[in-house]
Image: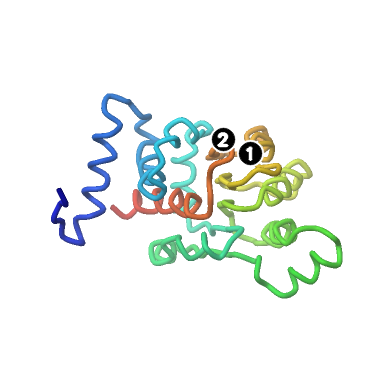
Amino acid sequence: MIEQIKPMDIEKRSFEIITETLGDRKLDPENELVIKRVIHTSADFDYVENLTFSEHAVQKGIEALRGGCDIVTDTQMARSGINKTILGKLGGEVHCFMSDPDVAAEAKQRGITRAIVSMERAAALEKPCIFAIGNAPTALLSLKEQIDAGKLNPALIIGVPVGFVNVVESKELIMQAGVPYIVARGRKGGSNVAAAICNAMLYQIMR
């Protein structure tokens, strides 16, 4: 039987269904809203197991956002999905350098991916940044190299690229980088998941 639900109540009902489906499963209260928003975005309950958080990662991300930090993404899709109205009110903005012609030209000239060049550009930003990576494992590898070299100190890395080549390995490396992280272990993830995690933190600030 089809439920008759007003448009403004659809999201509320969706979260009720998620809670009902989880049943007696207890989530860490600090991470609960992030996990549920990712499930809401993906309809995939595997994220209850896959999402891995460094100590107080969500709270550190929220504190950075409150402080006006920027967000760097590796896709225009993730950039589009992040609530820029709330972020702007907090003093932050979203950057994605992947489509910049000079980034493409430099990547071609050096024989590397645009994601690597994009992360190098991001390292030059003067503000603290959260990195929301949903597509390119080479972005995570670049971030790890720059952290190890002392060139970058991210406020938080959201490492959720989806795919098969170097995806699992790059996520595991980020978990060893010594910075706050939220990682979807395994092959699952995506730009929508990266945006959902950002929004889950933003909505906690503005609720």
Number of numbered discs overlaid on the protein picture: 2
Mark 2 near mark 1, Cβ–Cβ under 8 Å?
yes
Residue receiving disc 1: 171
Q: CA distance from mark 2 to mark 1?
A: 7 Å
Residue ID at (16%, 52%)? 2
Nearest the viewer among 6 and 147 is 6
Residue 126 shown left or right of residue 55 in the figure: right
Residue 92 seen anywhere in this rendered image of the structure: yes
Residue 200 x/y as whole percent: 39, 49
What amino acid is at disc 2? Arg
Residue receiving disc 2: 185
Residue ID at (67%, 32%)? 176
Q: Could you say which quadrant of the image residue 111 lies in?
A: bottom right
N-terminal of the pair, mark 2 or mark 1, is: 1
Pointer 2 local density, CA inside 10 Å: few below 14, some 14–19, many at least 20: many
Name the element at disc 1.
helix
Pointer 1 local density, CA inside 10 Å: few below 14, some 14–19, many at least 20: many
Nearest the viewer among 188 and 148 is 188
Using the image, determine if residue 143 lies above or below residue 70: above
Residue 139 x/y as whole percent: 68, 51
Q: Could you say which quadrant of the image residue 72 lies in?
A: bottom right
Residue 132 shown left or right of residue 124 in the figure: left
Residue 156 seen anywhere in this rendered image of the structure: no
Name the element at disc 2.
loop
Nearest the viewer among 30 and 36 is 36
Residue ID at (48%, 65%)? 80
Residue 81 x/y as whole percent: 45, 61
What amino acid is at disc 1? Lys
